[in-house]
Image: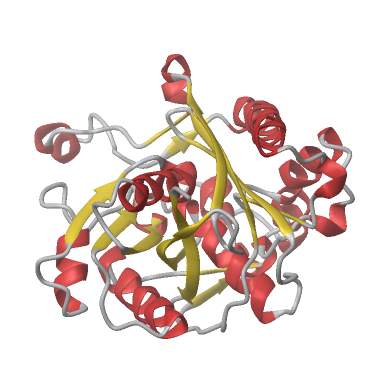
């Protein structure tokens, strides 16, 4: 039987600092009611002086403990907010974990990064380049936001979630069964953090704060995630009614509800923690998994699809049967 990548550990980390809607309303022209009704977010965690590598280290350590492992062959970080433009953050995280010599690299696909990361790690394992791997979805997106922009500051938070995968076979619970991945670069400017020269920034001619076209993003997110989920269901031979859990990128609650409606899926089968953490970009799916596991929502052996949509534009989905995992959180 061909090798397959099997999820065997899960960890997460959220910074201690919490920014509630009321705290944000004290700074900006907004309110808890305005934010909650439009995004579903009640609070978000803020990294402050911590970098993405710091958050990744903590989530990775928790995931390794969950898997009962001290070493893996590969470390992959899905992030849009690495500690440096160059070098990648993953090798430093690997070294801090005591994994010098491990294959390590960063992957940038924004809010779809975790799904793209699963496809990349799964390929490494299936090809025999690694017998085990650590995938971390991490972003410190608060560092990219305009302090005066209530729409983005209300939505985004910081965090990290990680999974450990090992070589196994497709019949095992936790095996990655089927993927759907796609992109549309014609719409790159719907969500972007522009590159700005030092001269432009110092002269006030331009800023490199993140910006998005919320209305256009809403429609694309609903369409692309719904269609991607349907394609991956077709590939694995499931109907939407066969799904026990849909774990989407936590974009906002209205998008999650619209995706469920498009799939004719009861909303209670959609795992969501956006109220507590906000949109954490590449960390959102593994953080939602960790939330579902701690709350006793996830069913061992249950049919599950993870789906994401983000800047690029990028989108993707993966199907698996959820394994029995010991929850840990740093």
Q: Of residues 106 and 195, which is closer to you in this image?
A: 106
Which of 224/215 is in front?
224
Question: Quick check: 165 left or right of 243?
Answer: left
Query: Which scheme is used to colour this image of the protein?
Result: secondary structure
**How far across and down, in percent of the image, does residue 192 sit?**
40, 33
**In the displayed structure image, the side of residue 194 where residue 232 appears, left or right:** right
Name the one closer to the observer, 192 or 272.
272
Residue at x 68%, y 71% (from the top left corner)? 292
Q: Residue 188 appears at what percent x and percent y?
A: 42, 23
Where residue 111 appears, x then y in whole percent? 48, 45
Asked if residue 330 can be seen in this view, the reply is: no
Q: In the visual, does 318 lie left or right of 197?
A: right
Q: Position of residue 70 (x, y in %)?
A: 29, 83
**Is any part of residue 293 visible from this angle?**
yes
* Depicted 46 relative to depicted 209: above or below: below
| Marker count (numbered) | 0
Q: Write the residue at 14% across / 33% down.
A: 197
75 vs 175, left or right, is: left
- The residue at the far front in this view is 1
Tell me which residue sits at (35%, 80%) in the image: 61
Q: Is residue 147 above or below residue 311?
A: below
Write the residue at 33% across / 69% down. Answer: 56
Can you say which quadrant of the picture contains the C terminus?
bottom left
């Amino acid at each position: 039987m061909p090798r397959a990548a099997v999820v065997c550990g899960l960890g997460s980390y959220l910074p201690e600092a919490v920014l509630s809607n009321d705290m944000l309303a004290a700074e900006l022209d907004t309110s808890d009611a305005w934010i909650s009704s439009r995004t579903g977010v009640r609070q978000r965690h803020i990294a402050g002086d911590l970098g993405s590598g710091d958050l990744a280290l903590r989530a990775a350590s928790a995931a390794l403990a969950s898997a009962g492992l001290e070493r893996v062959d590969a470390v992959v970080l899905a992030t849009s907010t690495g500690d440096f433009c160059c070098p990648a953050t993953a090798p430093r995280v690997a070294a801090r974990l005591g994994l010098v010599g491990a294959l390590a690299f960063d992957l940038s696909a924004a809010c779809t990064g975790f799904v793209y990361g699963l496809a990349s790690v799964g390929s490494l394992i299936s090809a025999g380049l690694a017998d085990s791997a650590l995938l971390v979805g991490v972003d410190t997106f608060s560092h990219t936001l305009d302090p005066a922009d209530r729409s983005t500051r209300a939505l985004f938070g910081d965090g990290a979630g990680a999974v450990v995968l090992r070589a196994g076979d497709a019949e095992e619970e936790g095996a990655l069964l089927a993927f759907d991945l796609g992109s549309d670069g014609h719409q790159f400017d719907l969500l972007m953090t522009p590159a700005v020269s030092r001269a432009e920034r110092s002269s006030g001619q331009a800023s490199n704060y993140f910006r998005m076209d919320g209305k256009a993003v809403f429609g694309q997110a609903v369409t692309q995630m719904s269609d991607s989920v349907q394609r991956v269901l077709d590939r694995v031979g499931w109907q939407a009614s066969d799904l026990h859990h849909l774990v989407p990128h936590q974009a906002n609650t209205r998008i999650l509800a619209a995706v469920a409606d498009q799939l004719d899926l009861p909303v209670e089968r959609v795992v969501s923690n956006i109220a507590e953490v906000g949109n954490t970009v590449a960390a959102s799916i593994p953080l939602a998994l960790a939330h579902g596991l701690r709350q006793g929502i996830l069913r061992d052996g249950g049919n599950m699809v993870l789906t994401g949509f983000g800047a690029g534009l990028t989108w993707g989905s993966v199907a698996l049967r959820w394994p029995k995992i010991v929850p840990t959180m740093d």
